[in-house]
């Protein structure tokens, strides 16, 4: 019998990559759920309705040896600040519910968390380092971690990842992809761009491939893992790369080298230490984390040659 895999948030940038990776890997019976943007092949489930979620888990017969990859979240820090109650429900309550169902039914839960659970003052961060989020988004994701880790009999892994990019229905779905639109806007509008915080943009296709390989390890897993690409950039530096790849000027983009005094606070550098994750694959014959170089992937994706 194939392993059942349930992917929540399967219409999002990460969730769709994870759903497709399992679907095309073979040996898996994959179900994807979404809410407001469910497309062909996805089931419509409102994660905020406990009864609906519990009923759906039972209907899919998710149990011992199966997996739930929980990608659904409110991932936009600015929007989280504007809608704190719903963000808390989605980012904190729902993971706890899934962990309780994992404990009852025996399936393995992977909760996708974020590097923003750290304050950015002492990178790189190991899975055991103390969390100290600076904004509501990070706090709700931290609370989601605690909810998952607090369920004693749950089979769970908290997987922290940094800022994401990759194939997306529209560039606005990713804080990295949207910078393409900023570079391409040659209307005369000026943009102030963060040249203060160091990010480690990571491709959702790499994370999806990693998750498929993780399910094949058949060994005890740490309760917290980190996955991240290794190239540091500010958002302004990413704009410069896109400018070169697209052959467009970037004079309309102004770097901001100090933290802004208003808006949602962002940590300076939340680099994730991935050595424990790499060690899982040392004797497996696998390629380890296997992440794509940033400019190389975008060059291929945009079908242009690197400058």
Image (cartoon, rainbow, N blue to C red):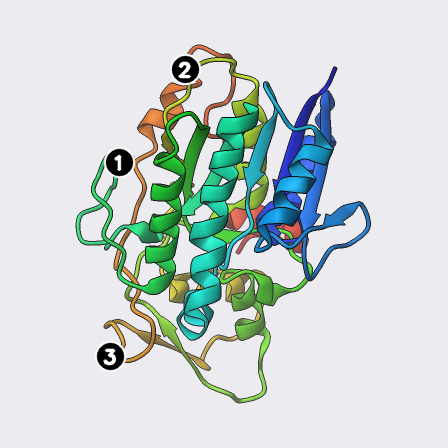
- Mark 1 Cα shell of 10 Å, populated few (<14), some (14-19), many (≥20): some
Helix or strand or loop: what does disc 3 sit on? loop
Q: Nearer the viewer, residue 232 or 130?
A: 130
Disc assigned to residue 126: 1
| Coordinates of residue 159 in the picture (x, y in percent) | 43, 37
Q: Earlier in the sequence, mark 1 or mark 2?
A: 1
User: Image quarter for residue 153?
Assistant: top left
Task: Locate residue 72, reporting x and y percent.
Answer: 56, 50
Q: Position of residue 213 (x, y in %)?
A: 56, 24
Work out how far the residue at label 3 is from the one at label 1, CA to CA, in angstroms. 29 Å
Give the mark nearer the N terminus: 3 vs 1: 1
- Residue 63, quarter of the rendered image: top right
Q: Is residue 209 left or right of residue 258?
A: right
From the viewer's perspective, tell me whether residue 82 is left or right of residue 45.
left
Tell me the element at label 2.
Answer: loop
The residue to which callout 2 is attached is: 282
Mark 2 or mark 3, which has the lower sequence index?
3
Residue sticking out furthest to the top: 283
Relative side of 202 to 136, left or right: right
Furthest-front residue in this view: 51
Q: Are marks 3 and 1 in contact (CB under 8 Å)?
A: no
Q: Quick one: 241 or 288, which is closer to the camera?
A: 288
Report the residue at 50% width, 22% height from top. Answer: 287
Identify the residue shown where x is 68% and y is 46%: 33
Q: Position of residue 74 (x, y in %)?
A: 50, 59
Residue position for label 3 = 261
Estimate the spatial distance between the alpha carbons at disc 2 and disc 3, rounded to whole Å: 45 Å
Q: Is residue 163 visible?
A: no
Q: CA distance from mark 1 to mark 2?
A: 18 Å
Q: Nearer the viewer, residue 21 or 291?
A: 21
Q: Determine crowd level at label 2: few under 14, some 14-19, many 20+ residues with C-alpha closer than 10 A.
A: few
């Amino acid at each position: 019998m194939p392993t059942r895999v349930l992917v929540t948030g399967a219409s999002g940038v990460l969730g769709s990559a994870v759903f497709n990776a399992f679907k095309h890997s073979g040996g898996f019976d994959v179900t994807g759920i979404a809410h407001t943007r469910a497309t062909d092949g996805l089931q419509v489930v409102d994660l905020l309705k406990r009864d609906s979620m519990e009923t759906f888990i039972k209907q899919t017969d998710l149990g011992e040896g199966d997996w739930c990859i929980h990608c659904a979240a409110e991932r936009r820090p600015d929007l989280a600040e504007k809608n704190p109650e719903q963000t808390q429900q989605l980012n904190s309550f729902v993971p706890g519910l899934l962990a309780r169902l994992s404990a009852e039914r025996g399936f393995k839960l992977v909760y996708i968390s974020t590097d923003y659970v750290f304050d950015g003052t002492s990178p790189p961060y190991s899975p055991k380092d103390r969390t100290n989020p600076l904004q509501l988004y990070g706090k709700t994701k931290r609370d989601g971690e605690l909810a998952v880790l607090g369920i004693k009999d749950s089979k769970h892994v908290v997987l922290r990842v940094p800022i994401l990019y990759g194939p997306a229905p529209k560039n606005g779905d990713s804080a990295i992809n949207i910078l393409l639109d900023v570079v391409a806007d040659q209307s005369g509008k000026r943009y102030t761009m963060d040249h203060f915080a160091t990010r480690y943009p990571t491709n959702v296709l790499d994370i999806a491939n990693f998750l498929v390989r993780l399910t094949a390890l058949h060994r005890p897993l740490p309760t917290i893992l980190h996955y991240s690409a290794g190239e540091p950039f500010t958002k302004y530096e990413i704009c410069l790369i896109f400018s070169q790849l697209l052959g467009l000027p970037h004079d309309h983009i102004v770097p901001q080298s100090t933290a802004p005094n208003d808006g949602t606070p962002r940590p300076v550098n939340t680099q994730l230490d991935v050595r424990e994750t790499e060690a899982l694959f040392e004797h497996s014959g696998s390629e380890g984390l296997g992440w794509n170089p940033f400019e190389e992937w975008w060059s291929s994706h945009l079908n242009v040659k690197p400058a």
